[in-house]
């Protein structure tokens, strides 16, 4: 764990998990010379409900071109993207729940190869089922800075916020190791005021801004939105919500420009 401490995590930080240590070690490696994302790029984040409606891919095929970044929660492997577009996309999968038929989790699909990919795993306090987070990093055109992308599916089934907070604490240990552009997005399961308040504190601690949607037709529960896109050093030039009925969540789309 010495490598972790030397990269910004102190011994006073919360207990360091194997996932955090692995991500911290990866972040400490020199930036690789892979093809970068453009300084203006598109993204979508979507909980696809394990692909229960096989038509969910139609929502992505309906646009002129696929987004540069596709952040899926409740994704599954083997993924259908290879048969859809061939080898032009790169899949970074972090496993979560597994049944006899499906291996599901969180997947980030990118138009360029990520410089790194690592995973964090939390567990539902009641059900003990895993909830995954996938962390990827990309170069950016005409910039010495890199973009860190955190795609997460947050703990859901608990009365309080203990498991939810613990999961975020691990993610925050990774966020503090990156001082450049940042995307934190996914199904945050923010169905209570306490959960929303924690996310507001997260934004303040890491200088994050929430992407706004007008009209805001994000999937909600108890009047609170569940899905979010948070950014740093990126300006949204377009943002919209697509409510298609092919999942129990709507998808969030955004065009972003490097500040």
Image: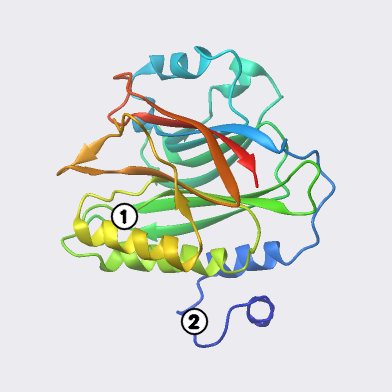
In this rendering, is residue 66 above or below 105? Answer: above
- On screen, residue 84 versus residue 77, left or right, reads right
Disc 2 and disc 1: Cα gap in Å? Answer: 21 Å
Residue 34 locus on image (x, y percent): 81, 43
Of badges 2 and 1, nearer the viewer stands 2
The tag on residue 155 is 1
For residue 226, what is the image quadrant? Answer: top left
Disc 2 target residue: 13
For residue 195, what is the image quadrant? Answer: bottom left
In this rendering, is residue 24 above or below 114? Answer: below
Mark 1: which secondary structure? loop
Residue 177 locus on image (x, y percent): 62, 68
Q: Earlier in the sequence, mark 2 or mark 1?
A: 2
Tell me the crowding category of disc 1: few under 14, some 14 to 19, or many 20 or more residues within 10 angstroms, Cα based: many
Q: Residue at x 79, y 56 (%)?
A: 31
Q: Residue at x 42, y 69 (%)?
A: 169
Residue 214 locus on image (x, y percent): 35, 31
The one nearer the camera, 11 or 209, is: 209
């Amino acid at each position: 764990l010495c490598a972790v401490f030397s990269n910004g995590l102190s011994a006073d930080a919360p207990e360091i998990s194997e996932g955090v240590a692995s991500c911290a070690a990866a972040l400490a490696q020199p930036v690789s010379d892979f093809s970068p994302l453009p300084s203006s790029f598109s993204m979508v984040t979507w909980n696809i409900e394990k692909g229960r409606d096989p038509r969910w891919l139609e929502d992505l095929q309906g646009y002129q071109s696929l987004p540069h970044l596709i952040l899926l929660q409740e994704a599954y492997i083997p993924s259908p993207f290879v048969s859809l577009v061939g080898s032009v996309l790169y899949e970074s999968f972090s496993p979560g729940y597994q049944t006899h038929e499906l291996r599901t989790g969180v997947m980030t699909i990118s138009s360029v190869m990520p410089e790194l990919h690592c995973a964090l795993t939390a567990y539902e306090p009641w059900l003990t089922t895993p909830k995954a987070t996938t962390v990827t990093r990309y170069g950016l055109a005409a910039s010495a800075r890199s973009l860190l992308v955190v795609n997460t599916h947050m703990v859901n089934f608990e009365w309080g916020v203990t498991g939810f907070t613990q999961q975020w604490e691990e993610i925050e240990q990774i966020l503090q190791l990156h001082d450049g552009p940042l995307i934190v997005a996914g199904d945050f399961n923010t169905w209570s005021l306490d959960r929303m308040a924690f996310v507001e504190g997260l934004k303040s601690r890491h200088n994050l801004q929430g992407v706004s949607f007008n009209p805001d037709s994000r999937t909600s529960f108890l009047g609170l939105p569940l899905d979010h896109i948070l950014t740093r050093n990126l300006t949204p030039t377009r943002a919209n919500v697509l409510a298609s009925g092919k999942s129990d969540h709507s998808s969030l789309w955004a065009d972003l420009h490097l500040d």
